[in-house]
Image (cartoon, rainbow, N blue to C red):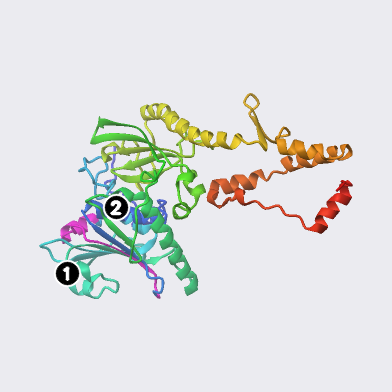
Amino acid sequence: MRYREDMSPQPRSHIKTLMRIGYDLNSAIADIIDNSITAKATKIYIASPSEADKPFISIVDNGNGMSSEELIQNMRIGCKDPNEKRESGDLGRFGSGMKTASFSHARRLTVISKKKGHKIAAACWDIDEIEERNIWCLQELDGEDIKNLEHLDLNIVDSHGTQLIWENIKKFNSSDHNDSKTKIETSMVELKKYLELHFHKFMQGPSKINIYVQKLKIDPFDPFLSTKKGYQEGASEETPIKGGKLKIKVHILPHHSNLTQSEIDGFGGMEEIYKGQGLYIYRENRLIIAGGWMGLSRTYQLGKLARIEINIPSGLDEEWSTDVKKSSLQLPLRMKNRLKKLIQDPIKKSTRAYTYRGKKEEANEYWQIMENTREKTVIYQINTENNELIEVAKDTPKKNILGLKEYLRNLAINLPINHIHSKVSSDPKSIRQDEVKLEFTEDQINKIKELYKWNT
């Protein structure tokens, strides 16, 4: 038997694979933030000036920083064993996140870092150079190189922390400066919303982290609306497992009647809130899965207030098949069976919240709601036993009763169900049914009289 001792991939080909792992911009920057949090940063700044001639992204933290030796080691692809035991709170996974996340969007990655008691250090991966030379040629910058960096954050020089600079960003490249500017501004708005949700637990409490996007501090977004009137806290449990505790908690969101219009607008509308029903899975308090039942249950129209929070330690990465991007995972079979039972409780509570309000609306002398549970059909029908309608019918000539009946039938058939559903789902506070006005001009009254030959 014969062995080939070195069959490592060609750098020119390998780098193309790393560039296509599948990070979108939000998940890529989130992976960088994971490293900042692991480095004990309390402030993280993300900026991409839209007016820059050559677009770039700068990510700066005030974490522990790295010495020159640590930086070079961390610039290596796959610098950590994913099965290696990690400290609690370590959001890393494969030791490749910083590089692969960066390569997914930028052709040039520069990392500058300073650790207390050490000189500032910097290194750079340039994909153009790797492809041209077909070797992993890491650039290690000296003091003069660092001082001349165009986008260097001077806070790193004077204190400690780490800065990443992404250049030659394919998403922002455009021959039209205005087009590039629009792409940057849109991306930063989307990034802000993404980070508000996925890192909301880190931006709360006494040890909170402040995150800034385009110099603006972002606020945490609680997907459970737990501080709002009408929120219901369901069952919770903790199970000791490998590397810590598995925590599960049930949440029922408040009905829209308990929210102000400004709150609803701030959340992106009721439709955005409603479509988020399902599982919220956190890894070391960092949100990985935001909504959806992962095949455990179907989406319920009346269960859209239901949420189940699951928090797992990083020690379960192998069992839960956490991917390199930390944006997806797989539920173990025993967890699926446990969740299938647990899911029914929040869905039932959410359904009751809606059914209760539905019954109030059904107790209505003008409409009847005919529901056939066997055939699973619903008919919204005008109540012909309504006293006002009976009085009108009494004064209507017999020859016009059939016309009146046909008009009411058509009125019910043409109820704008789809529009009502859309508005109730997306913007329920905009509906002002109690302000309905029905006025006839004298000419319209005369036409009606003529048409039906009613007596005055």
Foreground residue, 445 or 100?
445
Q: Is residue 109 magenta?
A: no
Can you say whether 411 is above or below 24 in the image? Answer: above
Residue 352 screen position, x and y as percent: 49, 32
Foreground residue, 298 or 357?
357
Q: Quadrant of residue 227?
A: top left
**Three-letter code, disc 2:** Met
Q: In this rendering, would 114 be left or right of 55?
A: left
Which secondary structure, mark 1? helix
**Three-letter code, disc 1:** Asp
Foreground residue, 42 or 133?
42
What label sits on residue 203 in the rendered view? 2
The residue indicated by pointer 1 is 158
Which secondary structure, mark 2? helix
Which residues lie in the magenta part?
Answer: 53-74
Q: Quadrant of residue 171?
A: bottom left
**How far apart are labels 2 and 1 at the CA level?**
26 Å
